[in-house]
Amino acid sequence: MAVLRQPSPGNRARIASERVLRLAERQWGVVARWQLTQCGVGGSAISRWVAAGRLHRVYPGVYAVGHRAISTEGRLLAAVLYAGRGAALSHATAASWLGLISYLPDTTHVTGPRRRRSRVGVRVHRARDFDRVMHRGLPVTPVARTLVDFAAIAPLEQVRKAVAEADYMRILDLDGIDVIARRGRAGSARLKRALVLHRPQYAQTLSPLEDRFLDLCSLHRLPFPEVNMIVADHKVDALWRRQRVIVELDGRQAHGTEVRMANDRDRDLALRSAGYSVLRYSWRQVSQEPAAVAADVRRALRERG
């Protein structure tokens, strides 16, 4: 009978090292201690690798392999690994990764089934039972749960914007929200309020001033315009297509130079030549004189209706 030969200690170390490198390549350069153990790297070897600079501690039990410079994906996955097996990006971080908000928060939010202390740069939330999905290579909470969790930590305007973005992307899961947004659960009331106020046009806005103008339309019961549409080769801020009325919004800085003001006048002339009525309002007018702006828009819509 043939005798199976066990790999020599040197070969075992080489095989373990190769496994770790392959794993790190799949995980943007970061690995967890329990994964190292699965690859065949024992506790004493981990200590030696750290001392030799082969591993760099990111969080307790989580290491960067070979160097400290890790990508955004590596940083996010490191936080997930720190939270433990079965964890996922959640709250604002999941909302960002899913594309529901335009910024990635400085603090990485993760949810996991085990107790973990939050650390500088990582907020760990505990949940015994939750689903997770893979999105762009990282585990995240599903859209419905992400929106509820995001609503627990974000102001209403941001939640409403995230709802509009989910609707625009056709991933707004109303049935899932109904299941998750239970009475008394953090974020449920604010998310439901955002759904009541929801308008898909918020997903097309490009500035806080445009958001504020849509708020003005809602508050003063004006028909909602199309947002950031192309008319006569120009992108316009707000358009009522049937009445052929356009509103242009001048931000605090964008329209202050002589060159920009001259360009604005040329745009307005071209749009009027194409048969549109063009109204233009400043940040101050939209913010401090909303009733007057609303009355002016309503008059223009009525005259051209």
Image (cartoon, grey):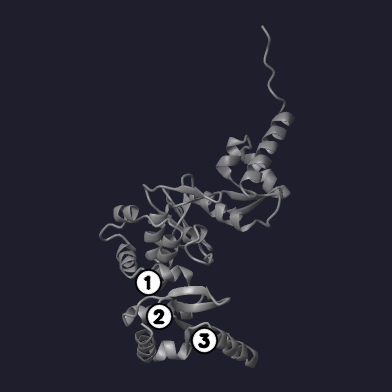
Tell whether label 2 touches label 1 (CB within 8 Å).
no
Image spot of residue 35 (x, y percent): 57, 41
204 in relation to 59, above or below: below
Is there any visible trace of residue 45 in the rendered image? no
Tell whether label 3 touches label 1 (CB within 8 Å).
no
Image spot of residue 105 (x, y percent): 52, 66
Mark closest to the chain's N terminus, 3 or 2: 2
Neighbour tally class for label 1: few under 14, some 14-19, many 20 plus, Cα within 10 Å: some
Q: Which mark is residue 107?
A: none
Q: Nearer the viewer, mark 1 or mark 2?
A: 2
Q: Secondary structure at mark 3?
A: helix
Q: Amino acid at mark 2?
A: Gln
Report the residue marked by disc 2.
243
Report the residue marked by disc 1.
156
Report the residue marked by disc 3.
272
Is there any visible trace of residue 25 in the rendered image? yes
* Residue 210 vs residue 303, the one in the foreground: 303
* Residue 300 vs residue 135, the one in the foreground: 300
Mark closest to the chain's N terminus, 1 or 3: 1
Q: Amino acid at mark 3?
A: Arg
